[in-house]
Amino acid sequence: MGEQPSWQDVLDLIAQLNESDYESASVQVGDVSIRLSKNDVGFDTPESAGRVGAQPLIETGFDTPATAGRVGAQPRIETGFDTPTSSATQPATALGDTIDAPMIGVFYRRPSPGAAPFVEPGQRVEADTTIGIIEIMKLMNPIVAGKAGVITDFLVSDADAVEFGQPLATINTSA
Amino acid sequence: MSDVPVILVANRGEIAMRIIAAARRIGASPVLAASVADKDSPAARAADRVIVIGASPANQSYLKPEQVAQAAVMAGAAAVHPGYGFLSEQPALCELLEEEGIAWVGPRPETLRAVGDKGSARQVAIDAGVPVGAGVEIDDPTNVVALGEQIGYPLLIKAIHGGGGRGIRLVTNPEELVELAPQAAAEAVAAFGNGALYLERYYGRARHVEVQVFGDGEGNAWIFGDRDCSVQRRHQKLIEECPAPGLSEKRRQLLHDSSRALVKVLRYRGAGTVEFLVDTESEDVIFLEVNARIQVEHPVTEEAFGVDLVAAQLLLALGRDPQLPDVGPVPPAAVIEMRINAEDPNADFQPNSGDITRLVWPKGPGIRIDTQIEEGYRFPPFYDSLMAKLIVRAHNRDAAVAAATAAVRNVTIDGLKTTLPMHAYVLAHPDFIAGGIPTSWFGPVWEARKESLT
């Protein structure tokens, strides 16, 4: 592996983007590519209700296919500089008993192949408990339950493609 | 891979229906990338499959390159057609697809960039020998007479650092220029912190004429005539026609040759439009911009020449022969398109949405309707107001105007306010019937009609 940017380099980049007129930036240093966006134009995904506000993503994508689809290899850093707020797009779950995909992508139940699933049916979760990950064009997004309760079943398998709003799991919120 | 290529349709409304029809025509399988609001739309039913890419607002669905690209991957698409608007001229989606080995139905990303902003597009036009608007910077605001002569009158004094219509003055003769230039410089200093000015020729009575091109990506071009889109309200086209009426042979040749030169310089790939300003008070023809996509008004050209431009786009993107004929500069028919918008022309063209309770289209030879609406369709509030395009073809312009007038009279759309009354008025107006009106025509004429009614 070639040279890598230091933490400070990344932070400096964020500061520079924040003060600039640019909407987004893409930087390649050695083996590491960094993409930043102020306002989620270009490569962000709809904000799930489970996440707070519209937060810019920083993706450090190591360009090796083997790591694509894995979580641990792709740190995801969220910072809080000003961005236009987006309205929450969590699809209505009127019945209150499903957890729906907040974005299109590939759903993973485990942080990496071979690892234990984030949660198993029968397990109690809080609103901010991560139940899986959705990968959209190599960008990993943690998916939280969004509500407290007991997960009763998963409706999609590990590594299934899911559409926006597709139910991922059922949850008993009165349990 | 099966023999049937999948085409991902990354758009909505009538253009989604149009792309689906073209995909069927070439034996491909259309898959629609839809927002939540459109997942049960007529286009969704017409497609082989629907993939929900995001929430109803366009900025959470149709405007998200990552989400569209993800849908293309999930669909196993061979190509993605972006339609018009949304991501159609954004290199971002095009490049994401390239990484996945999925074809983009449109020009190369570098072409999108080259024509994507006024400055670089102007430079491309100059490189291609295409006439651009005369403009010159002022070095000394007390010495401007020669510059004024160079540009010609009327002209505009513009502050280089101005914007949004501020810092612009209309000048009709040298005396005014001598008087106003120093004032404008002083004001520009005060307003923008910089007194730099330039002069630009002003065309108050120009037409909007555009040329339909189709490039093979190697520098060769098919030219499918021209369109006049001068019936406009606040830069929004209302009525388009093919061919542009009353163009001299010389002017038409200049427009077509210029467009061909641009295709060559850009090695343009696929369908595109070169827009020009055609002055009615001088012989000037000025390049405006290249629209690197299929346009709303493409059907007038298709009907006039008997071609399927969208199918040709798909074929080219799939690496096949686009099956287009070589045609002359003037088509053998005249075609008029009326954009029927969900807007109330008697209330400042305010958009409205709601249920379409009754819908009747006219029938007859030469009538084409491009639309997604049907009886019972709930016209959504999230997107633009285009409901349908009524396209009418006849053997010459007079006959086309008459046929269009009758067609408009025989449309019934209940449940929503539409722009149909405006079309009936324009089609019956002597200025429109005569042909060749400038883009500044509609606004005051429609206002005057309103006043005459009250």
Image: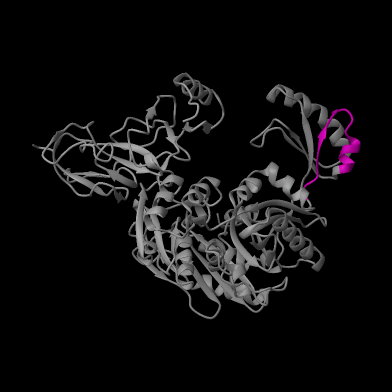
Location of the C terminus of chain B by quadrant is bottom right
Q: Residue furthest top?
A: A8
> Can you say whether B335 is above or below B33 in the image?
below
> Can you say whether B277 is above or below B333 in the image?
above
Residue B162, located in which quarter of the rendered image? top right
Q: Residue furthest front?
A: A1
Q: Which residues are magenta?
A: B132-150
Location of the N terminus of chain B by quadrant is bottom left
- Observer able to see residue B227: yes
User: What is the tally of numbered marks visible in this picture?
Assistant: 0
What residue is rendered at 89% in x and 30% in y?
Answer: B143
Q: Residue furthest left?
A: A175
Percent across and percent down for residue A97 are: 16, 44
Q: Determine whether, in the image, residue B86 is placed left or right of residue B301.
A: left
Residue B296, located in which quarter of the rendered image? bottom right
What residue is rendered at 69% in x and 24% in y?
Answer: B191
Q: Which of these two is toward me, B397 or A175?
A: A175
Percent across and percent down for residue A139 are: 39, 39
Q: Is residue B133 magenta?
A: yes
Q: Which of these two is toward me, B124 or A8?
A: A8
Percent across and percent down for residue B17 are: 44, 64
Q: Which of these two is toward me, B238 or A142?
A: A142
Residue A59, located in which quarter of the rendered image? top left
